[in-house]
Image (spheres, rainbow, N blue to C red):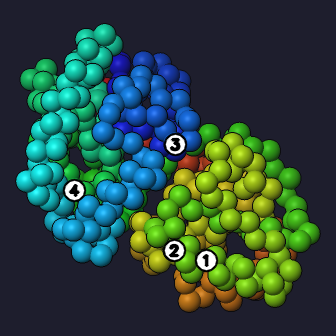
Amino acid sequence: MKILYISPENTVNTLTMWKLAHKEKGNKCEFITLFKSRNNFDPGICLDLPLVNSKSWYMFWRHKYYQLFRGALGDYKQKNGYPPIWTPNSRVEKYFFHFRDWLWNFYVEPAIKKNNLFDYDIYHFEWGLEFYRDCRFVDKLIDLDKAISCTYHGQDLRTRGVLKPLNKASKLNITSELDLLNKHPNMKYMFLPYDTKQFSHDIKINDPIRICHAPTDRHYKGSETIIPICERLAKEKGVEFILIEDKPFNEAQEIKKSCDILIDQVHNRGGWGYGMNSVEGLSMGLCCVTELLPEYVNFIPDHPFINADGESLYVVLSELICNKDKIIEYKKKSFSWVDKFHNYTNTSNVLYSYYEDLGWL
């Protein structure tokens, strides 16, 4: 069996994990990306398309544009709908995507021919996107009776919405974001795949205790609440606070690995609970603090997180700093739990069970 992933970028290296997982199942897997990852992960077959990227300047101006139509929240404003459906915000935006589809045609069509992209059995569209906004590639897959799946990672569904033709064609919709189960009538949950066994574990505590926070987006992570509290604790309790930001991926990983406590997020603006940031931290054997809503606690009752919101974070961290045995207890729980649920071999078993239910195997 041959599986193809199409994604804007290999954001947190999950595409590499999926390729490995499918290969270990005895199947062929490739992935194709539209532009290179910010963290320099393997881009697979990279088209390096114009007029799109994830650099800070691009995201800034996109946010400013959306503020014109969505108000102050701009690109952060969530859409209504079940599921939310993408439509252009203006005639200018509509013409922009028409022009971009025309331009990208000169990059995409040669790549389709060169890489035999119609010669796969199952197609996974990450972020619920294909090459073209008008979904012409998916239209051809429908004619060829191909198996079509979409994976949604959060903001793609919350603030953009599904592309109607692709959503209609997709028989399997997957997410690792629990709140998205309430935003789509046909959504399956799957834990993020990760190589959880790549780090060695020496369960100890630094002196002074090292607390880190590693936001990819300060708004979504609630950093305006987290950072002042950690800086206050550094002064009052003598702990060391490390803000991991704007660092090369490998350097950021080394810093994170040297810490004791990771604070993921509060306020649940970019989804509920946790993401790859915590998966990495748990795999390193860190004590992870994040905000978990009751729905998430019920969903993963044996979780290894210390639950804190914006109001309780200072007290929770203060008590944790004064109780090193508790830090060690959670460090020990971290790896066993993350290996059970997030190891890529386990997540691939879940994915293949979905394939089997649909008759794709």
The Cα atoms of the two marked residues, 4 and 3, are separated by: 24 Å
Circle 4: residue type: Gly
Q: In the picture provided, is 223 more to the left or to the right than 35?
A: right
Say which of marks 1 and 3 sits in front.
Answer: 3
Q: Characterize the local packing of mark 3: few (<14), some (14-19) or many (20 or more) Cα atoms within 10 angstroms.
A: some
Question: Can the viewer see residue 21 in this picture?
Answer: no
Q: CA distance from mark 2 to mark 3?
A: 22 Å
Residue that label 3 marks: 38
Q: CA distance from mark 1 to mark 2?
A: 6 Å
Label 2: state its secondary structure: loop
Q: Is residue 359 left or right of residue 134?
A: right
Q: Which residue is mark 2?
A: 222
Instruction: Say which element carries label 1.
Output: helix
**Horizontal side of residue 296 vs 263, given as left or right:** left
Of residues 302 and 222, the one nearer the viewer is 222
Q: Which amino acid type is shown beneath numbered disc 3?
A: Arg
**What's the residue type where badge 1 is placed?**
Ile
Is tag 4's residue or tag 3's residue first in the polypeptide sequence? 3
Distance from Cα at disc 1 to Cα at disc 4: 30 Å
The residue sitting at 20% across, 36% down in the picture is 100
